[in-house]
Amino acid sequence: MFDFLKKKFSSWLGKAKVKNKTKSSEIQKAKKKEEKSVKKKSEKISKLTKDEKESLEKAEKIILETEKSSPVTSMYEEIEAQEDSQKEGNFFTRLIKKITTSKLEQKDFEELFLELELTLLENNVALEAVDAIKKNLSFALVGQQIKKTEAEARILQALKDSILSLLIEPPNLVQKIKDSSSTFVIIFFGINGTGKTTTVAKLAHLLKKNHITSVLAAGDTFRAASIEQLRTHAERLHLPIVAHQYGSDPAAVAYDAKKYADAHNIKVVLIDTAGRMYTKENLLKEMEKIIRISKPDLKIFVGESITGNDVIEQAKSFNDSIGIDGIILTKADVDEKAGAILSVSHITNKPIYYLGTGQSYDSLLPFKKKDVLKNLGLE
């Protein structure tokens, strides 16, 4: 995940560091070369007669004037200027240069930020999240003039802080469940094909590893083979499952699963539901009924990370319609752009609890803000 953004950031940061080192090295070499040349010239001039010195001065003037008026020299100067402009052309190096030569004005920041803005948008970061990064970076840097030695570190820290400001650190779900004094109910919802049923099984496996008992509730009574799929997971994980017939009321399944948990001293009820489009009013009313009956402690939206802005819109719409408490993003391991990870938490103001990173039961990773910076190559 974050492959494309990581390469871009690495390119920017790498070029800035290499450029600074190369520039310093080249200056030192040039100084030494000039010192040697001046020393040799002085030694030769000291041995010349008065007439020879005057002739030499005239010759040097003629050469200097010829070089200045030479079209070849002008062409090379133009090429060198273009190369220097290209070398200093990326967002990071231009920002360093600007902020170390004068106070950074808002109009200059707007112009410099454009490259970063386009890069983020190309990597599926939502416009609302890009605007938040821009606002935070502007607040940290506009009006600032920073020493050259501090500029890179200050700008990098401002970028990291801006990215982190988009994310909400989730609570420790395992600990939250352990601290609960009653049966803990979690309901999962989202559109079709996002991996809800498999995510339910993965979380059940995680709970089992932490010595927390759970029962699975087959609330998807609509999709063909959905109950069998969840039953297969239950058998593999050696967990109980509560299921009714296809076409039955999913709210009744949720109610019976909670009763089963209470009767058998089971800590967690994990309710799978049918995939539903957030635009279908009748399906949302059905979900509202399940929520009203089961009274969940946690409502989890499950979406595919790889769908980018689509999953952000889905999460926002579900949150507006029935409210969500957290998010699990599946297929994060194959999401090279990963813009949804940077955006969905900020736009819904809800934490990402886990990232699905494969097909095995163990491939459910707790989400941590600091891991985002590592994956972006900023740590």
Image (spheres, rainbow, N blue to C red):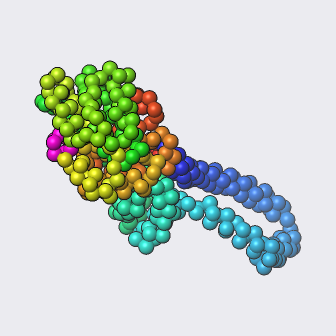
Q: Nearer the viewer, residue 78 or 28?
A: 78
Report how many numbered discs are placed on residues in the image.
Answer: 0
- In the image, what residue occupies the spot 67% across and 68% down? 81
Q: Nearer the viewer, residue 266 or 222?
A: 222
Q: Please provide percent x and percent y for residue 192.
A: 39, 46
Q: On the rendered structure, is 190 left or right of 171?
A: right
Magenta segment includes 292: yes
Q: Please provide percent x and percent y for residue 351.
A: 30, 46
Q: Is residue 219 above or below residue 152?
A: above
To which quarter of the image does residue 57 belong? bottom right
Q: Nearer the viewer, residue 157 or 223?
A: 223
To which quarter of the image does residue 27 belong? bottom right
Camera sees residue 210 = no
Camera sees residue 234 = yes
Q: Please provide percent x and percent y for residue 147.
A: 44, 58
Magenta stretch, overall SS: helix
- In the image, what residue occupies the spot 39% across and 35% down? 225
Magenta segment includes 137: no
Q: Please provide percent x and percent y for residue 21.
A: 59, 50
Q: Is residue 52 above or below residue 187?
A: below
Q: Quadrant of the C terminus?
A: top left
- In the image, what residue occupies the spot 34% across and 28% down? 231
Q: Is residue 330 above or below residue 234?
A: below
Q: Which residues are magenta?
A: 290-296
- In the image, what residue occupies the spot 70% across and 66% down? 80
To which quarter of the image does residue 369 belong? top left
